[in-house]
Amino acid sequence: MIETLLNLRSLRAQAREMSIEDLQEGLQKFTQVVEERRVEEEAAKAENKEQEAKLQKYRDMLAAEGITPEELIALMGDAPKTKKKRASRPAKYKFVDENGDEKTWTGQGRTPKALQQLLDNGDALASFEI
């Protein structure tokens, strides 16, 4: 649909099948949508411009007083908090996979395929503890 609207040749081909009245009605609706979108865009730009003006005003006030934004943030105690990564869990089990590689498992989550095969063959999980 959008390709038809944006491609002049396709639009002409579709227009041949429509009456002048239908085309005129479509043009009016399309013009209305474009105008609504233009008003929304201008409002958003004005809001952003107003916000930027406020921010610049406060930057200038801070600079005049010799305060850096970092100092202000530190003073407020609301420094951006970084999400702390949880420490990785130590491995509890050690086993050898089908390729002969030694692997470890923490005991959390799904049992590794190679370890599950060993357990299915009758080995005890306790025999793989580190």
Image: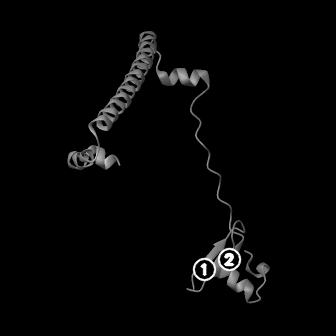
The foreground one among 120 and 48 is 48
SS class, disc 2: strand
Who is closer to the viewer here, 20 or 81? 20
* Pointers 1 and 2 in contact (C-beta within 8 Å): yes
Query: Which residue is under mark 2?
Result: 94
* Residue 108, above or below 95: above
Mark found first going from the N terminus, 1 or 2: 2
Question: Percent position (x, y) of residue 71?
Answer: 52, 22
- Residue linked to disc 1: 102
Looking at numbered disc 2 in the image, what kind of residue is underneath it? Lys
Numbered marks: total:
2
Alpha-carbon neighbours of circle 2 within 10 Å: few (<14), some, or many (≥20)? some
Which of 41 and 57 lies nearest the eye of the viewer?
A: 41
Q: Residue drawn 65% across and 75% down? A: 112
Residue type at mark 1 is Glu
Q: Nearer the viewer, residue 33 or 87?
A: 33
Can you say which quadrant of the picture contains the C terminus?
A: bottom right
The outermost residue toward the bottom is 121
